[in-house]
Each structure stands twice: as C-alpha cells, then as structure tokens.
C-alpha cells in the first residue's frame, strides 16, 4: 500500500513547481552574484527553509549572514537581503526590508503574493504557488490539499536548492568543494 498523503504532497509539488518561473530564478541568481554580502531572513517555518538556504550559500563560499544572529553585521549598500515570506506582510520582515532599502541594499524575495508589501519593495521576486491562512488581502493563486502554508514552504526549500544548483557552475563550485566548507564542529 502506498503512503496516500505522501503521494498527494508529491503530486502537488510536481504540479505546482511547474508554475515557478525560470526567468524569476535567473534574476534572483543575478542579484546573488552581484551582491557584496548576502543577508537571509524568514519567519516561522518559512524561516527554516531560508536558514537552510543561507547554509548552502555559505557552502558555495559566499559571505552570508542570517538576520538576527549575534554575529550578523549591519547591512550596507551593495548587499542583498533575501526574504522568504509566504504572505509578504510579516511585520518584522517588512521592517527589515525597509532597513535594507534605506541602506542601499537590494532585496530578493520568495513569496506567494508578489503584490504584497515585501514584493512591492523587492528588486527580484520568485512567485511561489501556495496558500496561507495569514493572507487577508489577496486571492490565493492555488488551492492545496495540505494545511497551512505547507506547500509554500516545501516549494521554497526546493526553489532555494535549485538556485544553489544554478549558482554552482557560475561560481565554479563542485559538491566536493562545497563539502570542504561543511561544518566540522557539530
């Protein structure tokens, strides 16, 4: 017997991943390559996916910081803030985007709602299909059988991984070179 709900999730990922734009991914990658330093931010479960992305960017040898950590410096002109936010309206993330923009940094976001506050300030947007109960202002682009923002978080994680795969040849990095930067004190 197949794992019924797992099959539902896999089918949704297959179906809705096809709605993610390669052109938007290319613009996102361009922002990363041009940035002096990269700051990554997300809240809740979207933040978990964003944190994993910051880890992979470090494995590529980039100067990356996760917002809110004690060792995160101030963002400056020429830096990039990457924000994962399904709703695009989370107050703490909106505040961080405003700070980044005021300092001259660029902003790239993964969001369900590009027209929301964060998307309206972003220099690069990847629209991720999903739905979230936090949304009150916009129509959900799709309907998921999964609860909460699960589909958004899953597709965010996979989109972040696809960005890493796009960056590897651009930055001349192999999996072996990336592994050399993997934590050796865990």
Image (tube, grey):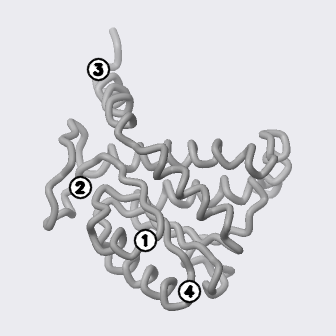
In this view of the protein, which residue sits in the foreground, 121 or 56?
Answer: 121
Label 1 secondary element? loop
In the image as oriented, which residue stretches furthest toward the front? 23
- Between disc 3 and disc 1, the foreground one is 1
Q: Residue at x 72, y 59 (%)?
A: 58
Instruction: Compare marks 4 and 3 and give the one earlier in the sequence.
Output: 3
**Left or right: where does residue 45 sit relative to residue 52?**
left
Instruction: Compare marks 1 and 2 and give the one earlier in the sequence.
Output: 1
Q: Residue at x 61, y 84 (%)?
A: 75
Label 2 secondary element? loop
The location of residue 48, given as percent across then percent down, is 49, 57
Residue on which the image places disc 3: 4
The location of residue 91, given as percent across then percent down, is 32, 79
Q: CB of mark 3 within 8 Å of CB of mark 1?
A: no
The location of residue 177, given as percent across then percent down, is 84, 45
Badge 4: residue crowd in 10 Å (few <14, some 14–19, many ≥20): some
Q: Is residue 43 above or below residue 96?
A: above
**Left or right: where does residue 12 sit relative to residue 163?**
left
Residue on which the image places disc 4: 104
Give the image quarter of residue 51.
Answer: bottom right
Residue on which the image places disc 1: 122
Instruction: Compare marks 2 and 3 and give the one earlier in the sequence.
Output: 3
């Amino acid at each position: 017997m197949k794992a019924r709900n797992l099959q539902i999730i896999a089918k949704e990922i297959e179906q809705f991943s096809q709605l993610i734009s390669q052109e938007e991914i290319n613009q996102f990658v361009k922002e990363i390559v041009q940035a002096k330093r990269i700051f990554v931010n997300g809240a809740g479960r979207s933040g978990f996916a964003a944190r994993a992305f910051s880890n992979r960017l470090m494995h590529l040898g980039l100067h990356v910081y996760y917002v809110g950590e004690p060792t995160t410096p101030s963002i400056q002109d020429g830096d990039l803030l990457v924000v994962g936010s399904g709703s695009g309206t989370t107050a703490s993330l909106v505040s961080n985007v405003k700070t980044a923009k005021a300092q001259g940094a660029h902003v790239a976001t993964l969001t369900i709602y590009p027209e929301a506050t964060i998307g309206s300030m972003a220099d690069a947007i990847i629209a991720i299909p999903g739905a979230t109960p936090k949304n009150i202002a916009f129509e959900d682009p799709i309907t998921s059988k999964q609860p909460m923002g699960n589909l958004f978080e899953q597709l965010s994680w996979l989109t972040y991984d696809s960005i890493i795969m796009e960056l590897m040849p651009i930055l001349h990095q192999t999996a072996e070179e990336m592994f050399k930067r993997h934590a050796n004190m865990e």
